[in-house]
């Protein structure tokens, strides 16, 4: 397939397709269009014509030898639907771009439920699938791990939680991010802090409890709501907290989507953020800075997570390392408008 054919199928110009797949995405197209273009690239296995590109740059003749196309697969362990999860959607897009720049195409994506049918892990004959990326945490069974390691020689995991699996891992420590988020609320004078998000095997919930203990603050289960980390989960979580007669002046949400749903629920309950309730979360997705109020959140370098994941996997494929490696990226608190100093009487 050519750029012209991709452009025709996507309904955009050739120059738009070129900018998107060559990494010049800022301002090149809307998110929906970029996702559509990458879906076509994935479906068709398109790779750039290296010879043509190098000739255009007047590269030496020996550099114009085309390399064979290689493929990698993605296991979307954390997200059910990337269209509603901007964190993993942006991460996977950055991963695809970096892989594409190195002549790899993300060919197949599947979910944990597909592990119940082993044949889904067998790529069609002739496809040179070299490795697997696991996007996000999932509690794999022993049988599932055996299935993955049998199907893929090279595996890299990426996410905020580490996993008990001997493979390369690219992480931004969600536990430490949670500790810092709670500490920031404590600095603002908050002593009654609630939690919204998942709890089972979730490092951010563990950080919430540990941070309260470190600051000699009480933990109360009625100040928590065990909900899915989504806008709907955050919205429902606030309703649960209010129904439980919870007593809090601030809320730590496990991710931005949860915080967005929570702020909507607080607004409907006539509770002002941050005057009445401070809200902090983790991720710093693009939408967080366009909310009202703008969301205070722990910034995770989402795109860099994707790029580093692709680089680490390709290095392993090429024999650059054999032992499991762990790459940890930094984070910081993006201080915006959804948190305020605690007011006496709250």
Image: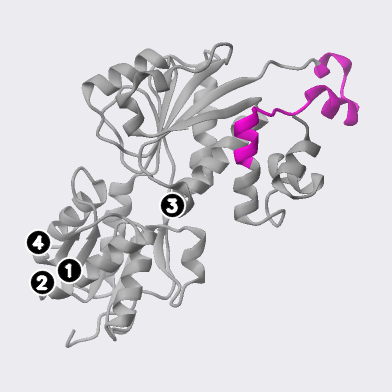
Q: Residues within 10 Å of mark 3 (few under 14, many from 20)?
A: some
Cα distance in 3D space between marks 1 and 4? 12 Å
Q: Main secondary structure of the magenta part?
A: helix
Q: Residue at x 29, y 78 (%)?
A: 266
Cα distance in 3D space between marks 3 and 2? 29 Å
Residue identifier under label 3 = 85
User: Label 2 near label 1: C-beta < 8 Å?
Assistant: yes
Return the x and y of residue 222 as percentages of the image width and height: 10, 66
Q: Residue at x 70, y 57 (%)?
A: 27
Residue identifier under label 1 = 240
Q: Nearer the viewer, mark 1 or mark 4?
A: 1
Return the x and y of residue 63 as percentages of the image width and height: 81, 18
Q: Which residues are magenta?
A: 38-64
Mark sitting earlier along the chain (4/3): 3
Residue 47 position (above or below residue 124): below
Q: Which mark is residue 213?
A: none
Q: Residue at x 39, y 44 (%)?
A: 172
Q: Residues within 10 Å of mark 2 (few under 14, many from 20)?
A: some
Please check the rendered image and state whether residue 130 is part of the magenta-colored stretch, yes or no.
no
Mark sitting earlier along the chain (1/4): 4
Question: Element type at marker 2?
Answer: loop
Residue identifier under label 2 = 244
Q: Residue at x 57, y 15 (%)?
A: 128
Return the x and y of residue 217 as percentages of the image width and height: 12, 65
Mark sitting earlier along the chain (3/2): 3
Return the x and y of residue 160 as percentages of the image width and height: 35, 44
Residue identifier under label 4 = 221
């Amino acid at each position: 397939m050519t750029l012209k054919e991709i452009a025709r199928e996507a309904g955009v110009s050739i120059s738009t397709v070129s900018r998107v797949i060559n990494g010049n995405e800022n301002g090149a197209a809307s998110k929906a269009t970029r996702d559509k273009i990458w879906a076509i690239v994935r479906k068709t296995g398109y790779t750039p014509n290296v010879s043509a590109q190098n000739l255009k740059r007047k590269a030496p003749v020996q550099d114009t030898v085309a390399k064979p196309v290689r493929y990698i697969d993605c296991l979307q362990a954390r997200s059910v639907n990337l269209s509603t999860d901007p964190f993993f959607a942006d991460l996977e897009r950055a991963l695809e771009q970096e892989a594409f720049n190195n002549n790899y195409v993300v060919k197949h994506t599947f979910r944990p439920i597909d592990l119940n049918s082993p044949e889904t892990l067998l790529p069609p004959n002739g496809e040179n699938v070299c490795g697997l990326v696991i996007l996000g945490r999932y509690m794999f069974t022993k049988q599932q791990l055996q299935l993955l390691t049998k199907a893929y020689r090279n595996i890299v995991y990426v996410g905020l939680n580490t996993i008990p699996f001997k493979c390369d891992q690219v992480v931004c420590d969600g536990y430490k991010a949670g500790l810092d988020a709670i500490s920031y609320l404590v600095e603002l004078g908050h002593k009654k802090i609630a939690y919204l998000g998942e709890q089972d095997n979730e490092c951010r919930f563990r950080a919430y409890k540990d941070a309260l203990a470190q600051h000699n603050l009480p933990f109360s289960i009625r100040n928590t709501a065990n909900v899915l980390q989504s806008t709907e989960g955050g919205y429902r979580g606030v309703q649960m907290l209010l129904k439980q007669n919870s007593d809090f002046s601030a809320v730590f949400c496990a991710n931005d989507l949860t915080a967005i749903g929570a702020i909507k629920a607080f607004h409907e309950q006539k509770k002002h953020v941050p005057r009445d309730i401070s809200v902090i979360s983790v991720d710093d997705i693009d939408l967080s800075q366009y909310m009202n109020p703008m969301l205070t959140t722990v910034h995770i370098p989402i795109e860099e997570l994707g790029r580093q994941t692709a680089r680490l996997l390709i290095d392993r494929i090429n024999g650059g390392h054999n032992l499991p490696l762990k790459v940890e990226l930094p984070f910081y608190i993006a201080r915006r408008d959804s948190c305020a100093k605690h007011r006496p009487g709250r």
